[in-house]
Image (cartoon, grey):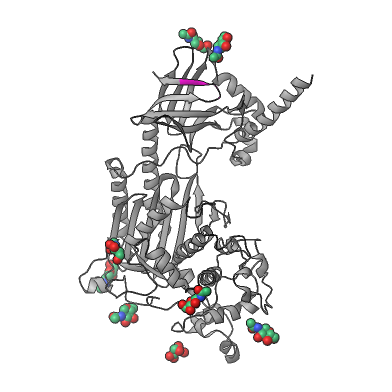
Amino acid sequence: MPFSLSSTTTLCLAAFSLFRQTEASCEPPIAFFPPSTSDGAFAPTLATIDKAVNVFLSDPSLQTSSLSIEITNARQSIWSRHHTSNVSVQAAENLEVDGSTVYMIASNTKVFTAMAILQLHALGRVNLDDAVTKYLPALKKNSTGGIEWDRISIRSLLSQQGGLPNNYAQSDLLADGVASLLGLPPVSDNEVASLPACDLNTTVPCDKKGLLQDLRTANPLFPPHVEASYSNVGFDLLGLVVEALTNATYEAYVTSKILKPLALNSTGFVAPSNTTGAVLEGESQWGQDLGIDNAAGGLYSSSDDMSLFLRHILNNHQTLSPTLNWLEPTTYSTGSHSFFGMPWEIFRTTGILPQTNRPVTFVTKGGGLVGYYSYIVLIPQHNLAVSLLYAGTLGSFNSLLETITTPLVLGAEALAQQELATKYTGTFSTTDLNSSLTISQSPSRSLFISAWISNGTEVLAPLNSFVSDLAGDGGEIYYQLVPTSETRQRGQQTGEVWRFYNVLDTPSASDKKGEVWNDYCVSNVDPLNYAGRAFNEAVFWVVDGLVDAVELTAFRARLARN
Ligand SMILES: *[C@@H]1O[C@H](CO)[C@@H](O)[C@H](O)[C@H]1NC(C)=O
Ligand SMILES: *[C@@H]1O[C@H](CO)[C@@H](O)[C@H](O)[C@H]1NC(C)=O
Ligand SMILES: *[C@@H]1O[C@H](CO)[C@@H](O)[C@H](O)[C@H]1NC(C)=O
Ligand SMILES: *[C@@H]1O[C@H](CO)[C@@H](O)[C@H](O)[C@H]1NC(C)=O
Ligand SMILES: *[C@@H]1O[C@H](CO)[C@@H](O)[C@H](O)[C@H]1NC(C)=O
Ligand SMILES: *[C@@H]1O[C@H](CO)[C@@H](O)[C@H](O)[C@H]1NC(C)=O
Ligand SMILES: *[C@@H]1O[C@H](CO)[C@@H](O)[C@H](O)[C@H]1NC(C)=O
Ligand SMILES: *[C@@H]1O[C@H](CO)[C@@H](O)[C@H](O)[C@H]1NC(C)=O
């Protein structure tokens, strides 16, 4: 019977995709639209952070450091705190560090460099997968060190996959005076003389000629794309790519195409006056001309400007270059939860939300020069971002990050859950048939289907057994509703398109033997059709901020709120 054979085959294929999802405790990373954190409902969360930061700042070891911390959402700054070092120019002149105080942002400059490249990508001037030698042919000329330049793309450089050395003339222990403490041998004058002048003398900026000359004989760290490793040299080269494409200096391009249009008036490549800057007593790289390293770490900026820039990123990361989402990872970093984007340092953890397996993603970039540290942390799920600027001796920065981001995410999560409960939950039914759907919310399941009858048939029980039969022995299955960001238009009304996604609540005891793999997930939010329509699609029709009707696409049913 060919018909039954073919329908069995179809079922198996379709079921396979369900199977892949249900075997493990996999939750979609996006369970809701970002909550609104601009109004009073978020005040308790900010008060909690304020208190915790006060405790952190009261540590005597921090009194000699200046610090600016700011939290912004996609619309506006929602919290900030500034701390003035007791050994700063500000303290000496009875001034206070504030949102306009300028710090060196060091490697956060790489975010601006990446943005410059992505702008040029969006204009069709650079293909991210072109070899860097297309734009910098000089790299290949007389190259003897073994770096496979033709295999290193613009994307490789942006995401630290080039296998390149980290630094050209910047990390030499010879300049530090600690060599003998580490048992390193003395080196001959000839060897010292052969080093680039900018290696040992910080008043001599490294330049393009020296960099290219050095790279001609430099050995690769890895062959391209074997393992990612942080490289400032890669960003020096991206700065040169910007120059090659625009016939302007890197600094001029960034100034005219990023800083000016975004009105980042306190941001630039030249140190401002010592009272505008967070300048401390003691050794620092304040005011040093970084030369060719400007594209890797040469910018100065303020907390206000960084927040403005972060808002721009939150609002534009999907469209800056239309063919990519800027905040996505490109490759692995070390550890099992860390990734590189372009140039992001991305950290994903399930450790922060106790009741669910849903990961929280922190898209970060850190920077450090002598005396200055900067961190930005974007939380795209919640449309939030944090900027930390620091002048002083670095203490425990992780504990500050934790102090701020943990309550921030927990607070935003609680608000988002509350919005789910208010807007979407309820029982919806039809009058012509015995059909009804109950949508509930809980902190562990977010929005889910808790009861479902279709034309007199209980749907959940047979659906569960259909899904779990194919998944083998499993724990409790529920159907989580996840937003797709797609909309449907009907007349004046706009419908939000959601999908329900089967999630295994907790692996059953017998699954423990496969525990390692319970975290193994293959996303497939579109597993089955019924008569040509997506089986798991639900369209929410919203009136006055409340879901008024739910349309179950494959069931050809529109259920109105009871
Ligand atoms: C700055 O604060 C530190 C730590 O509290 C203290 O030891 C030091 O004396 C202070 N320096 C000045 C100039 O006030
Ligand atoms: C490459 O080597 C050739 C021959 O040794 C030399 O003439 C040329 O100047 C070198 N090119 C560069 C860019 O150094
Ligand atoms: C560093 O370079 C500057 C500028 O060339 C020079 O004046 C100075 O003497 C150099 N310092 C040392 C320690 O060599
Ligand atoms: C590049 O810039 C220089 C100096 O500003 C100018 O003379 C030259 O015409 C420009 N070349 C191109 C191709 O735009
Ligand atoms: C930045 O400069 C622009 C242009 O000069 C000006 O319109 C804007 O008000 C300035 N923004 C701030 C925050 O000072
Ligand atoms: C500004 O501060 C730096 C670093 O402490 C110092 O070297 C420089 O002399 C200061 N400049 C002025 C004009 O005071
Ligand atoms: C509802 O169920 C009845 C009887 O089981 C069936 O005849 C009818 O076609 C169904 N209608 C719809 C719209 O599902
Ligand atoms: C609707 O269907 C459910 C499930 O079969 C059944 O328990 C319930 O009695 C029905 N309700 C009506 C009003 O027929």
Foreground of the two, 170 or 6:
6
Foreground of the two, 398 or 241:
241
Q: Determine whether 144 is above or below 97 in the image.
A: below
Q: Is residue 555 magenta?
A: yes
Question: In terms of image quarters, where does ligand 6 lie?
Answer: bottom left
Q: Determine whether 174 is above or below 110 in the image.
A: below
Q: Determine whether 295 is above or below 419 in the image.
A: below
Left or right of residue 494, residue 165 in this image: right
Q: Determine whether 498 is above or below 405 in the image.
A: above
Foreground of the two, 231 or 326:
326
* Residue 69: quarter of image: bottom left
* Residue name at image x 48 percent, y 70 percent: 295
Foreground of the two, 391 or 151:
151
Please identify the dominant SS of the magenta region. Answer: loop
Residue 438: x percent and y percent? Answer: 45, 22
Residue 360: x percent and y percent? Answer: 47, 45
Left or right of residue 251, residue 215 in this image: right
**Which region shows up in magenta?**
554-558
